[in-house]
Amino acid sequence: MTESSVETRAALGKVYLVGAGPGDPGLMTVKGKTLLECADVVVYDALVSPAILAMVHPAAELIDAGKRRGRHSRLQEETTRLLIEQAQRHAVVVRLKGGDPFIFGRGGEEMEDLVAAGVPVEVVPGITAGIAASAYAGIPLTHRSHSSSVTFVTGHESAGKYRPAVNWQAIAHGSETIVVYMGIHNLPYIVAELLTAQMPPETPIALVRWGTRPEQEELIGTLATIVSQVEATGFSAPAIAVIGSVVDLHSTLAHCRPQILLGAPAEDWVE
């Protein structure tokens, strides 16, 4: 390695892949909040809530790199290139992602690219929407009388991935609770696949939209009814789906949901 390349690598800042959680600022980790308060630049995703962005140091630069279906603001390669460029200019670069970076957040892909470019990088886990939104809806993903296993699966698959499609047949029989991310657009196909795999039509399913935020709402049905319910109500993304008998607990536990403190001062997050 040449002397100039050593100097270049020494001058690089560090990129932190930080999970912002699903929205409620009370679910932000202490480590993640600390990094936002000392970051030089924050590159954030579309689903990061305004209350989380309010934690960022006022002097830090904010860069929107959000992706939403039908209106991608940046290609993934452009985002990685942006992170490398920012690490060449700043000491602390935060890549702020909704939920957890390593749960359908492309954090692994971004970390691979940063490591290949010689950029120091660290992941700071966050609470993923599949866990938090379910909890705020009063749906425990495991329960001794209902479920001892959980599968997290994406309902939105990209072209050219490592395998052609999610094996819904296997997933239907692989665990007692299924949590589907980004599946609203493909819900008719997903439901049809699960029914083809002999899941009972009366299997309960809950859709949780804007989980852990003040605007959170749920749509409860069965595999036999949920598609028509979505069509009738106009229920839309962003939402997760929870499938399994644990959904039946919603009617009992939903009134005990955590208080959503979105926008509250930090000192009021914990009662």
Image: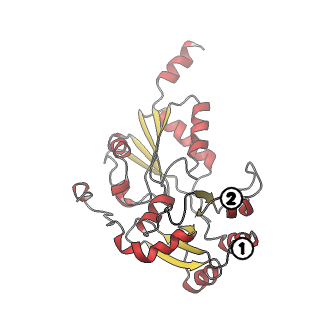
Tag 2: Cα neighbours inside 10 Å, few (<14), some, or many (≥20)? Answer: some
**Looking at the rendering, in which quadrant would you find the C terminus?**
bottom left
Rendered position, 67 above or below 85: below
Q: Which residue is mark 1?
A: 195
The answer to whether residue 181 is visible is: no
Give the number of the disc on residue 157. 2
Q: In the image, 88: left or right of 115?
A: left
Q: In the image, 82: left or right of 261?
A: right
Residue at screen point 36% across, 69% down: 257
The number of discs equals 2
Measured from the top left, where is residue 163 in percent x and y?
76, 51
Q: Please name which of the two marks, 2 or 1, marks the residue nearer to the observer.
A: 1
Q: Amino acid at mark 1?
A: Leu
Rendered position, 197 above or below 122: below
Per the image, label 1 sits on a secondary structure element best described as helix
Measured from the top left, where is residue 220 in percent x and y?
52, 78
State which tag comes first along the sequence, 2 or 1. 2
Give the number of the disc on residue 42. none
The answer to whether residue 118 is visible is: yes
Q: Amino acid at mark 2?
A: Glu
Residue at screen point 57% across, 57% down: 149
Nearer to me, 208 or 117: 208
Rendered position, 47 above or below 254: above
Nearer to me, 182 or 153: 153
> What is the residue that sits farthest to the front in this orientation?
145
